[in-house]
Structures are given as structure tokens and as C-alpha cells.
Image (spheres, rainbow, N blue to C red):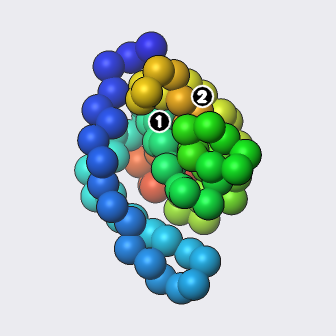
Amino acid sequence: MADYDFSRIDMTAVGSDRWEITFSDVPVGFEQRIRISDPNTCATDPNCASTQNVFANGVLLTRVVDTPGNGTEPGLAFAVATDATVTP
């Protein structure tokens, strides 16, 4: 796996069931990996990692990948094109 920086970044609540974060420096044309830790998913994932209903630029992320954490934890992968189009 490539060397990814998995620093914690908090999201902002934009409703009772929706959270957002904006990144302005996502490298274009390279696989990105993100792990969403959500206490609401602890019942279905021992790491509390959410891999459902996660979107990037309006595109549903569907490709589950490994991410580092307390051992290997599930995350989601995507790539961004120069026009900000996201490919899951």
C-alpha cells in the first residue's frame, strides 16, 4: 500500500444526519483513500468504520480498501480528475 497520511480531520454537521468536509488540495489522477470513523457504525464494524453512504463531489464511493489504523481498517478509495470529477 502507498504511504498515506491518515491524520484526523473533523467534519462539520450540516443536518441531523449529514456531515461534510471540504478539501482544496486533493492530488489529481491518483488514488485517494479515506476512512470515516463513525460511532453509529460500531454495531456493524468493530473499528467503527463507515463504508456506506459516503459521497465525494456527489458521487457515491463504493470501492472498499484497506487503511491503516488499529491494524487494518476498511476505508474507501476514489480518484479526482482535473475537472473535479470523481471516479469511485
* Residue drawn at 41 percent across, 48 percent down: 82
**In the foreground, 78 or 51:** 51
Indicate the secondary structure of the residue bearing disc 2.
strand
Indicate the secondary structure of the residue bearing disc 1.
strand
Q: Give the residue pinned by disc 2.
A: 65
**In the foreground, 8 or 27:** 8
Contact, mark 1 vs mark 2 (Cβ under 8 Å): yes
Say left or right for 16 vs 25.
right
Residue 56 visible in this rendered orientation of the protein: yes
Say left or right for 8 vs 1.
left
**Which residue ends up furthest to the bottom in the rendered image?**
15
Label 1, label 2: how many angstroms apart (C-alpha)? 8 Å
For disc 2, the neighbor class at 10 Å (few under 14, some 14 to 19, many from 20) is some
* Residue drawn at 57 percent across, 84 percent down: 16
Percent position of residue 69, x then y: 42, 29
Quadrant of residue 10 within the rendered picture: bottom left
Q: Which mark is residue 51?
A: none
* Residue drawn at 66 percent across, 41 percent down: 45
Percent position of residue 49, x then y: 57, 44
**Which residue ends up furthest to the top in the rendered image?**
1
Quarter that holds the N terminus: top left
Residue 59 visible in this rendered orientation of the protein: no
Q: Amino acid at mark 2?
A: Val
Q: Amino acid at mark 1?
A: Arg
Q: Give the residue pinned by disc 1.
A: 33
Quarter that holds the C terminus: top right
Say left or right for 24 vs 81.
left
**In the foreground, 84 or 40:** 40
* Residue drawn at 47 percent across, 82 percent down: 14
Say left or right for 9 vs 67.
left
Q: Is residue 55 above or below residue 45?
A: below
Percent position of residue 83, x then y: 45, 55
